[in-house]
Image (cartoon, rainbow, N blue to C red):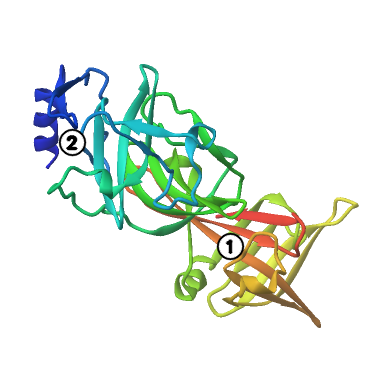
């Protein structure tokens, strides 16, 4: 498929044609077409009926965010690459100017009569944003921002394009899709089995102080030891037991929308914390490393531990 797309791009590099409503041929300048980097998303050039424009949305819904301050449109008199179909929509890339493209969705009814395209090969995986970042609908040229994502926001990953991740998120409950740098995301552990395995081991404090500990060791049999530093500077060791279970975010107890609830028992005290476990591959061998994001309430009091 990639070789076929490259061949098509080569043939149309200097010009292609769109059929106008009156049957005349409209010459389309394709000199600015960018090559799609390797990834799960790929596109091919497609000729549309000329002299038409269509509203462009960031996601396959008229209720989604729309670029250009809600006025984004594509003209069929310019080049259009098609990634595939998503229900009654098709995902396209087109040129706005020499310095800016846009990737978004138009109605599948825009396709010429008798023309069909394959369904988008989208995957859905939950991830968390590691730091504040911008989302763009033009990852290959201008990288102009479409929306913003705050640190610790949960997104759904849909596909890859080179060093970019295609994600789905909401802004004030309004749906949108766009691209962020892949390295700004970490996967989120969502199964109890993986969580119980991932938490076992020695952890050191990166930031925060929800549990008031600079070092914690979770053992597989359910015991826990830790080291806390008092205001005087003296270190105190403590021990107890731990357990985790799924947490229902509808309860609204933790600011980090935790997937799990961690129970710590130290002496006669029983403490509850919201627990999110982030997962990331590092190095050429794809080694998996984890980080624990622990919250003790609705405010932004948290503790981040790394192994």
Q: What residue is shown with label 2?
A: 46
Q: From the top left corner, tell me how far across and down residue 6 is, in percent.
A: 13, 31
257 lies left or right of 279: right
Q: Is residue 193 above or below residue 8?
A: below
Q: Circle 1 sits in a helix, a strand or a loop, which is it? A: strand
Instruction: Spot the residue most to the right.
Output: 232
Q: Quadrant of residue 123?
A: bottom left
Closer to us: mark 1 or mark 2? 2
Which corner quadrant holds the C terminus?
bottom right
Q: Nearer the viewer, residue 119 or 202?
A: 119
Residue 79, position as x, y percentages in the image: 24, 27
| Picture residue at 64% right of the left edge, 54% below the top | 304
* Quarter the N terminus occupies: top left
Marks 1 and 2 sit apart, C-alpha to C-alpha, by 44 Å
User: Which residue is denoted by mark 1 in the rendering?
Assistant: 276
Task: For residue 40, say whether it is visible.
Answer: no
Tell me if residue 247 comes above or below residue 302 in the rendering: below
Badge 1 crowding class, 10 Å Cα cut-off, few under 14, some 14 to 19, many 20 or more, is many
Residue plotted at (45% across, 75% down): 193
**The furthest residue to the front:** 22
Dot 1 or dot 2: first in sequence order is 2
Q: Is residue 179 shown to the viewer in this render? A: yes
Q: Secondary structure at mark 2?
A: loop
């Amino acid at each position: 498929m990639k070789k076929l797309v490259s061949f098509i791009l080569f043939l149309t590099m200097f010009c292609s044609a769109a059929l106008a409503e009156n049957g005349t041929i409209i010459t389309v300048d394709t000199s600015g077409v960018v090559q799609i980097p390797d990834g799960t998303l790929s596109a091919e050039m497609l000729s549309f009926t000329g002299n038409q424009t269509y509203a462009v949305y960031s996601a396959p819904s008229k209720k989604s965010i729309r670029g250009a301050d809600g006025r984004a449109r594509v003209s069929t008199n310019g080049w259009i690459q098609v990634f595939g179909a998503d229900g009654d929509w098709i995902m396209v890339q087109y040129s706005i100017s020499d310095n800016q493209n846009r990737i978004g969705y138009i109605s599948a009814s825009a396709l010429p009569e008798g023309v069909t395209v394959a369904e988008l090969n989208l995957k859905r995986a939950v991830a968390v944003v590691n730091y504040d970042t911008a989302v763009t609908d033009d990852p290959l040229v201008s990288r102009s921002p479409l929306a913003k994502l705050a640190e610790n926001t949960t997104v759904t990953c849909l596909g890859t394009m080179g060093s970019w991740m295609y994600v789905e998120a909401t802004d004030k409950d309004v749906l949108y899709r766009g691209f962020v740098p892949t390295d700004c995301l970490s996967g989120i552990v969502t199964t109890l089995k993986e969580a119980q395995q991932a938490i076992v081991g020695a952890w050191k404090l990166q930031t925060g102080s929800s549990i008031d500990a600079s070092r914690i060791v979770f053992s597989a049999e359910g015991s826990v030891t830790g080291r806390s530093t008092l205001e005087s500077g003296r270190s105190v060791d403590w021990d107890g037991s731990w357990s985790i279970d799924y947490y229902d975010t509808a309860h609204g107890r933790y600011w980090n929308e935790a997937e799990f609830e961690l129970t710590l028992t130290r002496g006669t005290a029983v403490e509850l914390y919201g627990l999110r476990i982030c997962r990331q591959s590092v190095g050429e061998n794809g080694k998996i490393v984890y980080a624990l994001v622990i919250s003790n309430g609705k405010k932004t009091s948290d503790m981040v531990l790394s192994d």
